[in-house]
Image (cartoon, rainbow, N blue to C red):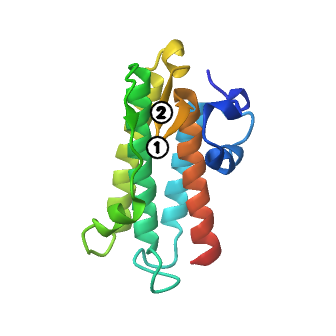
Amino acid sequence: MVFRRDIRPSEYAAYYEPYINSISLSSDMLFMLKETLRETIKFIDNLEKPLDHRYAPDKWSIGELLVHSMDTERIFSYRALSFMRGDATNLPGFDQDLYVRGLRDFAFAKANLISSLEIVRASTIDLFENATPESLNNLGVGSGHSMSVRAIPFVICGHWKHHLKIIEDRY
């Protein structure tokens, strides 16, 4: 079992530190993946503003911010899979603004968003539940930075927490 307290700064790029540090030291990665899913669904269910709400005209909507977080989770899960399998390819970063611009122009429905989130997270959990202890220690390169497989779930969950806090504070 991998706990957040076991992850060393050498296992991820420095700009992920705030995400990782937002997770409790005693959190193990599988519990954390399941718990942050519950917290996120509750957060979305309790949103009072519509998902197409923006706090400024040039900012992403709440729905776009949530879909961005799902896209990021998908990309980091792919990185984890690649690193687990020993793929030495330097995986590229992604242009988050391009991804958001590529979304269909539609009103986000909470039920659809939650369903997508549950599917994405179930896939992430399945990936890490079936990882070998050895593969969790594998390193790979994404966006030009070395990262361990075992750091990735903490980045994913910390990224979600970061964006939920932005919605809470600004929207």
Displayed quadrant of residue 95? bottom left
Q: Is residue 66 placed above or below 137 in the rendered structure?
A: below
Q: Residue at x 39, y 65 (%)?
A: 97
Q: Position of residue 154 (x, y in %)?
A: 59, 39
Q: Is residue 16 left or right of residue 41?
A: right
Q: Position of residue 98 (x, y in %)?
A: 34, 64
Q: What label sits on residue 99 in the rendered view? A: none
Q: State the residue position of label 1.
A: 143
Calculate the distance from the C-alpha at mark 2 to the C-alpha at mark 1: 7 Å
SS for dot 2: strand
Q: Residue at x 75, y 36 (%)?
A: 25
Graded by Cα atoms within 10 Å as few (under 14), some (14 to 19) or many (20 or more), the crowding at tag 1 reads: few
Q: Position of residue 166 (x, y in %)?
A: 60, 68
Residue sitting farthest toward the bottom: 57
Dot 1 amino acid type: Ser
Q: Residue at x 44, y 74 (%)?
A: 60
Q: Is residue 15 left or right of residue 107?
A: right
Graded by Cα atoms within 10 Å as few (under 14), some (14 to 19) or many (20 or more), the crowding at tag 2 reads: some
Q: Is residue 85 placed above or below 151 in the rendered structure?
A: above
Displayed quadrant of residue 171? bottom right
Give 4 or 119, whichever is nearer the viewer.
4
SS for dot 1: loop
Give 9 or 152, whichever is nearer the viewer.
9
Q: State the residue position of label 2.
A: 141
Q: Is residue 167 left or right of residue 107?
A: right
Dot 2 amino acid type: Val
Q: Which quadrant of the rendered structure holds the N terminus?
A: top right
